[in-house]
């Protein structure tokens, strides 16, 4: 008899309940950040709900096998479908990907003109896609190399479901380009990190831990981004992490936004520490920040985009770079329901 994937997963959760709870409690206890503690508590609550629903699901599944009356069977199947939807609803409604406001940190690997064009293409693609979804975007800062090439863009995305839409964008994105006659195709790489914002009380920073710098920001080729000395860079002295904001109208606004970005980066660093030191599974954490493997390839020569996780090629690169990413997003939506249930509590 074929294995029912829902029952199989619920039985796994029941069998490993103590180990999962222990791992979540340890994760929360070893972090000084309230955000991580809260998230662990949410997952414990979710686990209890899933096991309770799983028991009901197994009972009705057993009744279906034993019942021969067609009229009664119809009711059992309706109940089974309802419980299954409830199971996925628990995962969907309380999981990490419902976060609304996120930060995309888009960084090039090799500093050259082609990489600068690629990073601009990707950031513009995300901005146009967000416009089609009524999500607000804000380029918080652009960092340039000494040669004038863009090397990092911090893009803020705000609105309902932003975290859900962009949760798969973290990782290594590559481009294949034709550099010119009689030369081999050029491969470029960009890392994207998807960081969730945190509430003010979730991470408390002492003034003595921060170095705040005010500067006059400049764009490519010395072009002014900001006409006053209002751009702000904040360095977290204990870790060396920094964040900056250039595009707000006042120094106060830039400082507030830079601090928000810094806290998002600190949360990522804290979770990576816990994963490394405590050997906690990444899927028990808040977000999949960065996948060191190649996740997507943009082939400018063949005019296609290939996603390694979906194992699917999408035609018309130019159309996708104009923000028409829905086919890619739909590919992840189709695989997500069972994938979330399967992976979230793996130990």
Image (cartoon, helix red, strand yellow):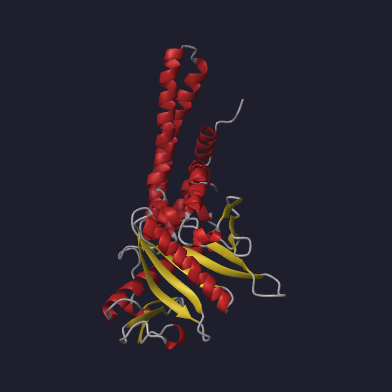
- Residue 139 position in % (x across, y down): 39, 71
Above or below, 179 against 336 in this view is: below
Quick one: 188 or 22, which is closer to the camera?
Answer: 188
Name, please, the residue furthest toward the top.
69
State whether residue 139 appears in this view: yes
Q: Is residue 148 left or right of residue 160?
A: right
- Residue 216 position in % (x across, y down): 36, 87
Task: Count the labels in the image.
Answer: 0
- Residue 88 position in % (x across, y down): 43, 39
Q: Is residue 164 left or right of residue 15?
A: left
Above or below, 206 against 313 in this view is: below
- Residue 126 position in % (x across, y down): 44, 62
Taking the spot 55% from the left edge, 60% from the top edge, the residue there is 317
Quick one: 126 or 217, which is closer to the camera?
Answer: 126
Name which quarter of the figure residue 51 lies in: top left
Name, please, the residue furthest toward the front.
181
Name which quarter of the figure residue 186 lies in: bottom right
Quarter of the figure that contains the N terminus: top right
Name, please, the residue furthest toward the right.
182
State whether residue 205 appears in this view: no
Q: Is residue 217 left or right of residue 64?
A: left
Above or below, 82 against 300 in this view is: above
């Amino acid at each position: 008899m074929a294995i029912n994937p829902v029952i199989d997963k619920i039985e796994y959760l029941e069998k490993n309940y103590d180990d999962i709870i222990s791992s979540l409690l340890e994760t929360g206890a070893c972090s000084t950040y309230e955000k991580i503690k809260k998230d662990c508590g949410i997952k414990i609550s979710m686990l209890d709900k899933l096991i309770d629903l799983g028991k009901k699901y197994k009972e009705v599944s057993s009744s279906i096998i034993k019942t021969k009356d067609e009229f009664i069977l119809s009711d059992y199947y309706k109940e089974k479908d309802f419980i299954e939807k409830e199971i996925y609803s628990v995962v969907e409604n309380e999981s990490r990907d419902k976060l609304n406001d996120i930060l995309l940190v888009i960084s090039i690997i090799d500093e050259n003109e082609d990489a600068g064009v690629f990073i601009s293409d990707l950031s513009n693609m995300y901005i146009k896609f967000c416009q089609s979804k009524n999500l607000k975007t804000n380029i918080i800062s652009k960092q340039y190399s000494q040669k004038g090439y863009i090397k990092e863009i911090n893009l803020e995305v705000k609105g309902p479901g932003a975290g859900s839409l962009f949760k798969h964008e973290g990782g290594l994105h590559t481009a294949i380009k034709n550099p010119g006659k009689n030369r081999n195709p050029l491969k470029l790489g960009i890392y994207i990190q998807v960081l969730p914002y945190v509430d003010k009380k979730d991470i408390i920073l002492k003034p003595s831990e921060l170095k705040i710098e005010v500067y006059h920001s400049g764009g490519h080729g010395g072009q002014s981004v900001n006409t006053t000395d209002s751009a702000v860079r904040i360095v977290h002295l204990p870790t060396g992490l920094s964040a900056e904001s250039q595009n707000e109208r006042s120094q106060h606004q830039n400082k507030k936004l830079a601090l928000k970005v810094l806290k998002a980066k600190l949360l990522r660093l804290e979770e990576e520490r816990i994963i490394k030191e405590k050997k906690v599974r990444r899927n028990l954490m808040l977000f999949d920040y960065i996948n060191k493997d190649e996740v997507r390839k943009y082939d400018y020569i063949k005019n296609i985009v290939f996603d390694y996780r979906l194992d699917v090629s999408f035609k018309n690169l130019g159309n996708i770079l104009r923000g028409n990413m829905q086919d890619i997003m739909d590919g992840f939506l189709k695989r997500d329901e069972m994938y979330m249930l399967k992976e979230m509590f793996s130990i």
